[in-house]
Amino acid sequence: MKQFPKEKILENNKLLFARWKTNTVSTKQYILMQENAFVFVIKGKKIIFRDKEILEVNNRQLLIVKKGIHNMTEYLAEDGVFEAIVIYFNDTFIKKMKLFDDVSIDTNQPNIKALNQQILVLNKNKTIESFVVQYVVYIQENENNQTILTLKVNELIYLLLSTYPYTRQFFSTIIYERNDLEDMVEKLYKENYTIDQLAKFSNRSLSTFKRDFNRIFQSSPAKWIVSRKLSDACVLLLNTNKSISEIAFESGFESLSLFDKSFRRHFKITPSFFREQPVNQNDKT
């Protein structure tokens, strides 16, 4: 799991301003966002993947991302550089603003794109663009005045609420909505993380993670993950001509031997024998 990177930063106890610049071609990967963030793309594009949806964010847009795990990559600009300003903010920062008073909601705003309310993309206007210029100067000049940084982010949020009233709902869910455990597990069950790591990614203690997991899935994390991988493998065995080895790795198993052992334990037959059986006999998944 990769954490969203930062090259040069300014920070206080509730905000962190980061400048990210790279000339390295990025691959599609999961990024752990430990805090919520505003992302201003300066050069290149940010690409967000969620289920079957793909969202491109360019330098004319503002990306707002909730903390959690997101599948992302970057496209370099023509000069071979990707650059962005990232402002991290925690839940408490939003809560203390009391930004829900006297703000109407218009769900038909044309300049908003959202993916299941975990990510919001807004088209920048001239006023928002002016904030980007100021943030770049603050970072370049190392202007780490906590009062100024806090006021500027407050001003940006109030501007967004005024320009795009729908953002009120998005910000409110940051306060009242816990991390979506089910969504996170569906993303990561093939990645072979430990249960301790999954608990950390969900911002839960290990005991709370196991308790919440059992409540949602009626199973322990380890048992559910193996069962889900085997279910995926069964679909591939019955509906593709891929080799057993290909199916093992595509289903998230670290080795062919582990896949074979898990399959035999669960189904009492080998993957090859399972593939040869009539479909109506294979409903154990």
Image: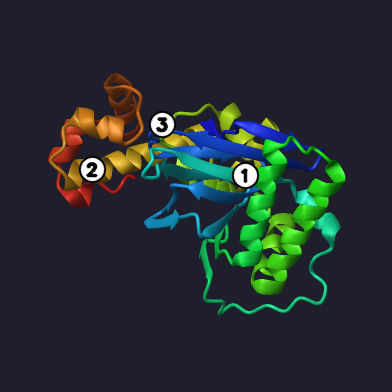
Answer yes or no: do the residues labelled 3 and 2 have beta carbons within 8 Å?
A: no
How was the colour assigned to the protein in this rendering? rainbow
**Residue at x-position 72% and y-position 60%:** 156
Label 3 and label 1: CA atoms lie apart by 18 Å
**Residue at x-position 79% and y-position 57%:** 154
Left or right, residue 260 beside residue 197: left
Answer yes or no: do the residues labelled 3 and 1 have beta carbons within 8 Å?
A: no
Comes first in the chain, label 3 or label 2: 3
**Quadrant location of the C terminus in the rendered image:** top left
Front disc: 3 or 2: 3
Q: Quadrant of residue 64?
A: bottom right
Q: Which residue is mark 3?
A: 24
Where residue 142 sits in the image (x, y, percent)? 74, 35
Where residue 181 sits in the image (x, y, percent)? 58, 47
Label 3 and label 2: CA atoms lie apart by 35 Å
Question: Which structural element holds mark 3?
Answer: loop
Label 2 neighbour load within 10 Å: few <14, some 14-19, many 20+: many
Q: Quick check: 156 above or below 232?
A: below
Residue 86 - label = 1
- Looking at the picture, which amino acid does disc 2 mark? Leu
**Residue at x-position 18% and y-position 48%:** 239
Label 1 neighbour load within 10 Å: few <14, some 14-19, many 20+: many
| Residue 99 vs residue 172, the one in the foreground | 99
**Residue at x-position 81% and y-position 77%:** 102
Q: Which residue is mark 2?
A: 236
- Looking at the picture, which amino acid does disc 1 mark? Val
Asked whether residue 99 appears in the rendered view, the answer is yes
Question: Which structural element holds mark 1?
Answer: strand
